[in-house]
Image: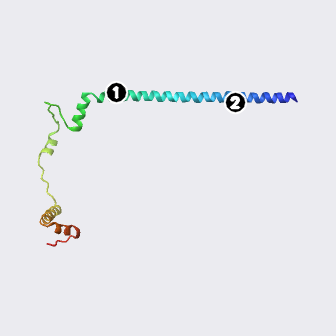
Amino acid sequence: MKKQYALTILIVIFLYLLYLVISYTYNDYRVGMYIEEIQNTNAQLLENIIETERELEQKTTLAHKNKVLKTEQWLRNRNEEVLFLISEERYRMFTEEQSIELPRSERTINERIGDTENLIASMTIYERWMYFLFWQDIR
């Protein structure tokens, strides 16, 4: 009977040691993966920092500032002439006066607007309030 207890105790000790080996191996694997993930993140952040530094250096140059001022604020350097190269067709389109004839309905609307403005201009303040609130001309 003592041999059976000894064998059972040895099997339990063996299983416990096997559990410890597997758990330590798994923890080592997790730590290794975590370290690898941190290294990859550090490498990526370092690349981003280098790229940002390059971009910042480029944006602080006079050429870039000059380009920004010219493109966004329509400025030019002293003694610099600007030439626009476009076709004659587009030149004519933007330089010739084009008379646009309004349709009859729009002309009457514009005339009514002009009449309304003249009407409002000739009223007193009280008459204007009455006109705007109740749309009644009390003159």
Answer with the quarter of the image where residue 78 lies. Answer: top left
The image position of residue 64, as x and y in percent, is 26, 30
Crowding around mark 2 (Cα neighbors within 10 Å: few <14, some 14 to 19, many 20+) is few
Q: Is residue 28 left or right of residue 68?
A: right
Answer with the quarter of the image where residue 106 lies. Answer: bottom left
**Residue receiving disc 2:** 19
| Badge number at residue 54 | 1
Q: Please, which colouring scheme is shown? A: rainbow
**Which mark sits nearer the N-terminus, 2 or 1?**
2
Dot 1: element: helix
118 vs 14: above or below = below
At 19% from the left edge and 36% from the top edge, which residue is drawn? Answer: 75
Crowding around mark 1 (Cα neighbors within 10 Å: few <14, some 14 to 19, many 20+) is few
> Quick one: which residue is furthest to the front in this view?
126
The image position of residue 116, as x and y in percent, is 15, 65
Relative to the observer, which residue lies in front, 104 or 73?
73
Mark 2: which amino acid?
Answer: Tyr
Dot 2: element: helix
Between the C-alphas of marks 2 and 1, the distance is 52 Å
Q: Is residue 118 left or right of residue 36?
A: left
Mark 1: which amino acid?
Answer: Arg
Relative to the observer, which residue lies in front, 104 or 12?
12
